[in-house]
Each structure stands twice: as structure tokens, then as C-alpha cells.
Image (cartoon, grey):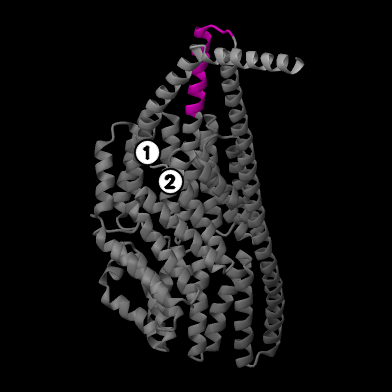
């Protein structure tokens, strides 16, 4: 039941930055940015964000912003801006892949952007278009097409200097491989995305955020919950570093879902409470919807469906948002799931039937599968086995279309049970055989999953070893350089001392002494720099404060020592000492001879 509910929420496509009230701090900031924008590019950017934001809650307003940005792009006659406008519209609709019509519209915009990019030899825009098309293909369960688009995008990204494009290309192809159950290739591409994101120069928040989130999803899929949590905690640390609080809400909610999936319900509840508290701080009431849906999933998983129902009743925001977004049938589906869990079958049937027409007309295959599966479960509980068979047959058709083994196994087992109840043993035998076949396949995949975990662990260890080797090689290289500098400075001072012993002009001694002491004190500062950065973690004001103190000590010391040493060497005292030593040695030899 948890899987069904979670799938429903994810496929709905409701995200923190999207499903909000029409007037709130987030939209206010977007509108302010739009008002202050001076360039056409910036205006298109902020209109795009607003059009994406308003799509689920006010399509007319969303379409209005989209129309304005499209007109601005057309009037500019700038081909890059025109392609950007098309891609913004593609992103606008692909943000809500729970509705098949949105996927189709997003694909049309991405194809138009691709045609424009090709006609004007804009390779990076070609890559972005392919990535958007790959996303649409994945949402339609067409993984082969998605992989083809991803490969085309990756080939362009590989020769590009745009790190953001590279990160998105790696993440996209990883997601496609994961859909195809090729987890190792998916994992390797995620590691490549992470490497590029973490080494990107300049502002790299969004690249790191996307890489951490994708890796957390990967480990969640493997049920490696601790590592899944690790990456979300890294993402949360990132939001603190870059002061992006709205994304932090997403990560608190995601952590709550991970803890709930790991049956750590107390901690999950704590994470959801943190999300609600942050939403209150931001004065963002409607944003709590995302937290509420996570809490409902947790209650259903914890076998407390009455709490999920009570939450819906106490929080009218949930109904308001669903209704204004045009997704009320999802709420009816949730009601059906909860009442089924509570064994209130007539109420469950009522809400499922209300949701059915909209589910059939609007949603993607994966959501249709969940709905038909739930309807079959309800019909079986009611003792209406023929009706259960009817719905599970529809589930089977979707399983055939998507090629999802888990769908096949679940459907075959349920159809086997229903046919046995009505005495149709021929079909019961057939579906029992099908169930055994798919169960064996999944069991093999489970073994492969264990091997995959070992491979992933080995890959992580290999990467760690490479990093350690690289650090050690760098340290060794630096140590050699430090040693070389030390030897060079020692040689300079030996030569300087020898100049004081022999008859060398004072000017030469002063010049060599000047450079010798510069080398010495700069080397001292160089050695101090590493320790200073370690103490201060690179905080500019702390580094500056320590260096002021250090220089205030070293500079007068430098001048004092240099003056004394150079004065001593140029005064010819060492030469006199040298003469005295030679004379004493000569006299000693004479006395010995006598």
C-alpha cells in the first residue's frame, strides 16, 4: 500500500516550487525579479518560472505568462531566446507527468526546440532538447527512445564546456538505465554527474543538489536507506550553505519518506514536523501540502489509515489545493485507498467510482495501473471476483505494455487467486505458471540486486582509493617542491655567507641578501598559508585577520634581521676572522715544525 501511495504522489508531479497559493512569498519574489529585469533574456527567464509555477493552480495565468515570453522571444529574433522559450514550455508541461496530455504537449515543444536548434547550429540547445524529449519518453514508459535521446544529448555534452549540461546529461541517462534495470551503468553515470557537479567552478548549487537527490533515489531503489539518507543530508547542508530554504522543505519531506519506508516512523514524523515548522517560518501555508501527502503515506504504511483520513479532514488546504489544481480525482483515489484499508468497502467503492472517469481520461499508464490494481483489490474484498478479474486484466494489459516484471508478478498472482475462487482452474493454472515464471525472474533480479550492491560498494571503494592515491600523489609532489625550495634557500644563504668571507663588492652582497631574505620570509608565509586555511576554512575575514597579525610580526623582523646580517657581511668582519684563523693555523704549523 505504501508503494501504491508513493507512486501516486510522485507521478502526480507536485513539487515544492510548483504547487502553491497564488499569492505567497515565492511568487512575490518571482514577480519582483520580473519587474526589475532589464534584458529580454531575464524577462523570459522569470516569466518562465511563473508560467511553470501557475500551471497546476491557474492554467489561464500560466498560459498568459507563457504567451508573453513566447512573444518576447519571437520579437527579439534571437534564435537562442526562441529556443529557450520553447524549452521553458516543454519543462512547464513535463513538470506534471501524471497527466498524459502534458507529456504529449511537452514532447511537441521539445521537438520544435530541437528543429530550431538544428536549423541554426546551436548544439547545446540540441542537447537540452534531447534531454527534455528523453524525460517525456521515460514518463511514457518508452525507455528505448529515452536512451536514444540521452545518447544523442550525451555525445553533444561530452564536447561542451557547459558543466550544467554535462550534469543533466549524466543524470538523465542514469535515470533511463535505471528504468531499464541496468543499475551499474546508471550508478556510474550518477558518479560522473557528481564529479562534474562538485568540481564545477563558480556557483554549483543546482548541479550538486540534483546529483545528491538522484543518488539518494538510486540508493532508495536498492533499499540502502542509510546511504539514501546520507545524500539527502548532504543536500540539506547545501541549502544551508547557499541559503536556499525552499529546497530544504523538499529534502525534509524526502527524508521523512525515506525514514517511513525504512519503518522508522517516529523519525519520519519528526522530519515532517521540521518541514511544517519551516513552512510556518516562510509564511507559506499551502506549501505544507507536500508534507501532508508524505504524512498520509506514512500513516498508511504504518497501518494507521484512520490517521490519514483524520489529517485530510483537519487540513482543508489539501482539498482546496487539489480542487484548484484540477486534481481532485487524486484525492478521491486517496480516499478509496484509505477506506479500503479500513475495510469500509462501500465508501471506498464510492470514491473509486467517482475518480475512475478522470483517471481513465487523464493519467499516465503507471497511475492507471495503480488504480486498476486498487479496484481489483476492493472487488475481491467485496467477493465480486469477476469484477476483480476485469480490473486486473486491465492491469495485465498495462504490465504487457510497460514490461514491468513486478506488475506482471502481482497481476498474475491475483488473477490466479480469483480464477480459483470462481472454479476456472484452467486459467488459474495458467496464471499460476505465469506467477512462478515472473517470481523466478524477480528472484534472479534480487540475487542480481545483492551482487549489484557489492559492485556498487566496490565502485565506491575504488573511487575512494583513487581519491586517496590522488591526494597522496599531490602531497608527495608538494613535499618534493617544499624540499627543493628549502635546499634552494639554504644554497642562497651559503653563497651569501661565502660572499662575506671573500672579497665581494658590498652592492652584490646587498642585492643577494635582499632576495635571500625575501625568499626566506615568503617561504615562511607559504608554509603558514595552508595551516591558516585549515583553521579558518577559507573564511576571507578570518584569513585576512590572521595574515595582518602575521605580517605585522614578520615584516619588522624581516627588516631587522636583513639589516643586521647585511651590515655584518659588508663590514668585512668575516674576512678579518678568516685572516686571523688562517694566520693562527700557519703559526701553529710553524711551531710544530720547530
Q: Which residue is mark 1?
A: 546
Q: Nearer the viewer, residue 243 or 358?
A: 243
Which residue does the image show at 72% across and 81% down from the upper left? 433
- Side of 551 relative to 139 (left or right): left
- Side of 396 relative to 201 (left or right): right
* The furthest residue to the front: 594
- Side of 286 relative to 184 (left or right): left
| Among the 4 quarters of the image, the one containing residue 5 | bottom left
Residue 42 seen in the current view: yes
Residues at discs 2 and 1 in contact (Cβ within 8 Å):
yes
The tag on residue 561 is: none
**Which range of residues does the magenta coloring cover?**
503-522
- Give percent across and percent down for residue 238: 42, 52
Which residue does the image show at 70% across and 66% down from the upper left? 451
Of mark 2 and mark 1, the one earlier in the sequence is 2
- Give percent across and percent down for residue 168: 52, 46
Helix, strand or loop for disc 1: helix
Helix, strand or loop for disc 2: helix
| Among the 4 quarters of the image, the one containing residue 22 | bottom left
Residue 295, relative to residue 91: is it above or below? Answer: below
Q: Main secondary structure of the magenta part?
A: helix
Please check the rendered image and state whether residue 506 is part of the magenta-colored stretch, yes or no.
Answer: yes
Q: Which residue is mark 2?
A: 535
Please check the rendered image and state whether residue 134 is part of the magenta-colored stretch, yes or no.
Answer: no
Residue 369, relative to residue 126: is it above or below? Answer: below
| Among the 4 quarters of the image, the one containing residue 83 | top left
Kindly report the distance in space between the C-alpha atoms of the residues bearing marks 2 and 1. 10 Å
Amino acid at each position: 500500500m505504501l508503494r501504491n501511495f508513493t507512486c501516486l504522489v510522485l507521478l502526480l508531479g507536485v513539487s515544492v516550487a510548483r504547487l502553491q497559493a497564488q499569492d505567497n512569498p515565492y511568487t512575490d519574489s518571482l514577480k519582483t525579479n520580473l519587474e526589475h529585469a532589464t534584458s529580454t533574456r531575464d524577462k523570459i527567464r522569470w516569466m518562465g518560472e511563473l508560467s511553470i509555477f501557475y500551471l497546476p493552480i491557474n492554467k489561464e495565468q500560466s498560459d498568459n505568462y507563457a504567451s508573453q515570453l513566447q512573444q518576447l522571444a519571437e520579437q527579439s529574433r534571437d534564435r537562442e531566446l526562441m529556443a529557450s522559450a520553447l524549452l521553458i514550455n516543454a519543462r512547464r508541461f513535463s513538470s506534471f507527468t501524471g497527466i498524459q496530455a502534458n507529456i504529449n504537449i511537452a514532447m511537441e515543444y521539445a521537438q520544435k526546440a530541437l528543429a530550431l536548434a538544428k536549423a541554426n547550429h546551436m548544439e547545446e540547445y540540441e542537447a537540452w532538447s534531447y534531454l527534455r524529449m528523453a524525460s517525456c519518453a521515460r514518463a511514457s514508459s518508452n525507455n528505448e527512445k529515452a536512451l536514444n535521446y540521452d545518447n544523442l544529448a550525451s555525445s553533444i555534452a561530452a564536447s561542451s564546456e557547459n558543466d550544467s549540461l554535462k550534469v543533466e546529461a549524466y543524470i538523465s541517462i542514469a535515470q533511463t538505465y535505471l528504468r531499464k534495470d541496468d543499475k551499474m551503468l546508471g550508478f556510474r553515470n550518477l558518479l560522473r554527474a557528481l564529479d562534474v557537479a562538485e568540481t564545477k567552478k563558480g556557483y554549483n548549487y543546482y548541479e550538486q543538489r540534483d546529483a545528491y537527490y538522484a543518488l539518494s533515489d538510486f540508493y532508495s531503489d536498492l533499499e540502502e536507506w542509510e546511504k539514501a539518507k546520507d545524500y539527502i543530508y548532504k543536500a540539506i547542508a547545501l541549502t544551508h550553505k547557499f541559503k536556499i530554504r525552499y529546497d530544504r522543505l523538499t529534502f525534509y519531506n524526502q527524508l521523512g519518506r525515506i525514514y517511513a519506508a525504512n519503518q522508522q516512523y517516529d523519525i519520519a514524523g519528526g522530519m515532517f514536523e521540521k518541514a511544517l515548522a519551516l513552512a510556518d517560518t516562510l509564511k507559506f501555508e499551502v506549501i505544507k501540502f507536500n508534507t501532508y501527502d508524505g504524512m498520509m503515506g506514512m500513516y498508511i504504511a504504518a497501518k494507521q489509515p484512520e490517521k490519514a483520513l483524520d489529517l485530510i479532514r483537519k487540513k482543508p488546504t489539501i482539498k482546496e489545493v487539489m480542487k484548484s489544481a484540477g486534481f481532485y480525482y487524486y484525492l478521491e483515489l486517496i480516499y478509496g485507498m484509505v477506506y479500503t484499508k479500513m475495510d469500509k468497502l462501500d465508501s471506498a467503492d464510492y470514491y473509486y467510482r467517482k475518480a475512475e472517469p478522470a483517471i481513465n481520461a487523464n493519467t499516465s499508464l503507471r497511475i492507471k495501473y495503480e488504480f486498476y490494481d486498487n479496484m481489483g483489490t476492493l472487488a475481491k474484498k467485496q467477493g465480486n471476483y469477476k469484477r476483480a478479474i476485469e480490473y486486473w486484466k486491465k492491469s495485465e494489459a498495462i504490465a504487457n505494455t510497460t514490461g514491468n516484471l513486478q506488475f506482471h508478478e502481482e497481476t498474475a498472482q491475483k488473477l490466479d487467486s480469483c480464477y480459483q475462487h470462481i472454479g476456472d482452474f484452467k486459467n488459474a493454472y495458467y496464471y499460476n505458471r505465469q506467477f512462478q515464471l515472473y517470481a523466478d525472474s524477480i528472484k534472479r533480479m534480487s540475487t542480481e540486486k545483492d551482487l549489484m550492491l557489492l559492485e556498487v560498494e566496490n565502485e565506491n571503494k575504488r573511487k575512494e582509493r583513487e581519491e586517496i592515491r590522488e591526494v597522496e600523489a599531490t602531497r608527495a609532489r608538494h613535499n618534493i617542491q617544499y624540499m627543493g625550495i628549502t635546499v634552494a634557500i639554504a644554497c642562497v644563504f651559503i653563497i651569501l655567507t661565502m660572499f662575506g668571507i671573500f672579497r665581494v663588492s658590498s652592492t652584490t652582497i646587498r642585492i643577494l641578501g635582499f632576495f635571500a631574505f625575501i625568499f626566506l620570509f615568503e617561504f615562511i608565509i607559504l608554509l603558514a598559508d595552508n595551516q591558516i586555511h585549515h583553521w579558518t576554512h577559507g573564511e576571507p575575514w578570518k584569513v585576512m585577520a590572521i595574515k595582518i597579525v602575521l605580517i605585522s610580526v614578520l615584516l619588522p623582523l624581516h627588516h631587522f634581521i636583513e639589516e643586521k646580517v647585511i651590515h655584518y657581511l659588508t663590514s668585512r668582519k668575516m674576512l678579518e676572522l678568516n685572516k686571523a684563523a688562517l694566520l693562527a693555523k700557519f703559526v701553529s704549523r710553524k711551531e710544530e715544525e720547530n
